[in-house]
Image (cartoon, grey):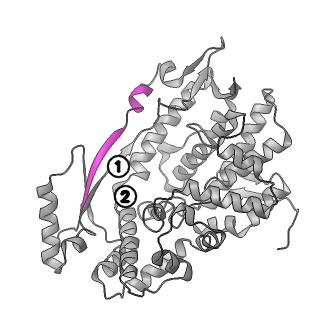
Amino acid sequence: MKSSNKLKIINDPIYGFITIPSPLVFQLIEHPYFQRLRRISQMGMSYLVYPGAHHTRFHHALGAMFLMQRAVQVLEFKRVEFSSEEKEALYIAILLHDIGHGPFSHAMEHSIVDNVSHEEISLVFMNKLNEIFEGKLDLAIQIFQNKYHRHFMHQLVSGQLDMDRLDYLRRDSFYTGVAEGNINSQRLIAMLNVHNDQLVVEEKGIYSVEKFIVARRFMYWQVYLHKTGLVAEQLLMHLLKRAKYLTDQGTELEASRALTYFLNHSVMLDDFTSEILHLFSKLDDNDIISAMKAWCDSEDFVLSELSKMLLNREFLKVKLKKEPFSEEKVTQKLNKVMKQHNLSKEEASYFVFQGTISNQAYSMDKDTINLIKNNGKVVDVAKASDQLNIEALSQKVVKHYLCYPKTR
């Protein structure tokens, strides 16, 4: 592999010019593992609701790195000391924080691999890249895992006011056109400081924090948990589940080599050898879309119908409410589908299913967002707020959903 030490400037639609800070960061961005993120959509199936939401994990990772650079600049100005190694490690940790995402972002975690989170796969990728780059990612991995002695650095990568959230809220707001999520991320960063090794926000930044928490709540209900996006993601997970079931039964399905492997094998975290990781790195949104196009002609009604629904945006009906749906109602919907298409109960359950979604804009239980007052006292933002009841937003809101075919 030919390496290059040229530093590049990338033009980002959100922030303008992003400068790549070091030759190592440039080489990581150039690596095929990272380039794959160009082919992984940031918001999964949400483009079926918001047509502009075609931005990728690649966009987001670079944007989060840019914000990390700004955070370091602000904290250095406020006399928080960083070594050059710590700064580079922070840039690498945030750059690679989402590298473990599979096709359409979250769908793979619940269908192809067995309960392996994208964070866990990200760490596997980081460890492999650390081998390739001869230990130069050691410090970045320590920060990512919260094993470095300066705890506030992990909070910058993964916390309630981290660079990940500050980028994705603003970026997703921009690409969906949902103005309610348009936070002023750079204003928030300008208010950051460090006190007793904890990330804090200066008291005058309280209104920016309040807007951030409210924006997060709006974006979850209006975008991330939008009922049409919800049913699309559920259908995709059911599609992959059906494909895996048929493969287990001996049916040969047309699919890429990488997807075929994961359909044929039960892969858990301990199974991620270098070879499996390499295969996983070959998976992206294109594998799933190509497979769906082929599976439309499958002899299996369930696989064929699910593929057509996703490709042609012909979705199930979704009902949301605060209380669980009665078993009688679910059974009624199941029986109707079974009779209409001559399906077994198990087959019909791919088209009639229920579940829950939840939204908690702010958690007061762990790693809170703390304000530092002018007198040096540190308080939870929920306790300090006098404009909005942040404590109310810290309550988890749960809704129940039921999906079933529309009446034709």
Image quadrant in which the N terminus is located: bottom right
Residue 129: image location, x then y, percent:
73, 61
**Does residue 120 appear to the left or right of 351 in the view shown?**
right
Screen quadrant of the C terminus? bottom left
The residue located at (62%, 14%) in the rendering is 377
Q: Is residue 13 visible?
A: no
> What residue type is disc 1 on?
Ile
Residue 92: x, y in percent?
73, 51
| Region rendered in magenta | 390-408
Quadrant in the rendering for residue 100: bottom right
| 372 drawn magenta | no
Disc 1 on helix, strand or loop? strand
Q: Amino acid at mark 2?
A: Leu
Q: Which residue is mark 2?
A: 230
Give the mark, 1 or 2, whose residue is nearer the N terminus: 2
Q: Residue at x 24, y 68 (%)?
A: 349
Describe the element under mark 2 as helix, strand or loop: helix
Residue 177 image point, x, y percent: 49, 53
Q: Is residue 79 left or right of residue 96?
A: right
Describe residue 403's horizontal placement relative to residue 111 as left or right: left
Can the viewer see residue 349? yes
Q: Are marks 1 and 2 in contact (CB under 8 Å)?
A: yes
Q: Quadrant of residue 29?
A: bottom right
Disc number for residue 357: 1
Kindly indicate the quadrant of the structure image that contains residue 7: bottom right
